[in-house]
Amino acid sequence: MTELEAKRQHVVVYVLVPLLVMCLAGGAGYLKYRGGSIVEAQSAATSSIQAATDGTIALLSYSPDTAQATLTAARDRLTGSFRDSYMSLTNDVVIPGAKEKKISATATVPAAASVSASENHAVVLVYVDQSVIVGDGAPSATASAVQVTLDKVGSQWLISGFDPK
């Protein structure tokens, strides 16, 4: 082996091989990190869709006899300024109207989809079918879409925005 071949072998063994190993380890670490964040985003999307669906039904369903208890309990699914405005609306308008005019409302969610989701914030588009009965009248049905914004507080997704579309 010539001196030049020995130097080349020395460079390959002591420089290029460790450099290649470091690059492969860095690439594997990056892929592991990206894979973990994708799984976290998918998990956040799934759990936020369920929270938005359940929350929407709770916010929009009530009967004259149980409106106070039902709509007051729904506030536990809310956070921030939306919670305050919802409580004000339900206490000042919805609950008295439900009792006085014997209004019943039943909401269902036939479909919901994640618009965006991260570890602590999500936006879900919820399609809502709602049937309302006033007194002894015939039910009236409406279909709508609502963009529900959620924030994760502790381990629970809470609604922080509710924007009809």
Image (cartoon, rainbow, N blue to C red):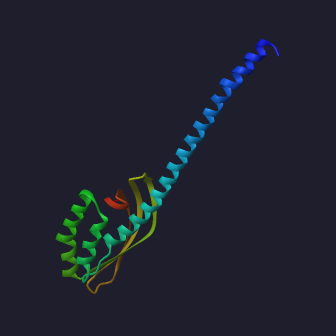
Q: Position of residue 142 (x, y in %)?
A: 37, 71
Relative to 22, say whether 29 is above or below.
below
Relative to 40, say whether 5 is above or below.
above
Relative to 157, say whether 20 is above or below.
above
Q: Position of residue 145 (x, y in %)?
A: 39, 63
Q: Is residue 138 left or right of residue 43?
A: left
Q: Which residue appears farthest toward the right when viewing the image?
A: 1
**Residue 165 appearing in the image:** no
Q: Position of residue 75 (x, y in %)?
A: 27, 67
Q: Residue at x 23, y 78 (%)?
A: 98
The C terminus lies in which quarter of the figure? Answer: bottom left
Relative to 23, say whether 12 is above or below.
above
44 or 112, nearer to the observer: 44
Q: Residue at x 68, y 29 (%)?
A: 17
Q: Residue at x 19, y 65 (%)?
A: 88
How many numbered circles does the render carry? 0
Q: Which residue appears farthest toward the top when viewing the image?
A: 3
**Residue 74 appearing in the image:** yes
Residue 122 occupies which quadrant of the picture? bottom left
The N terminus lies in which quarter of the figure? Answer: top right
Q: Position of residue 121 (x, y in %)?
A: 38, 53
Residue 69 occupies which quadrant of the picture? bottom left
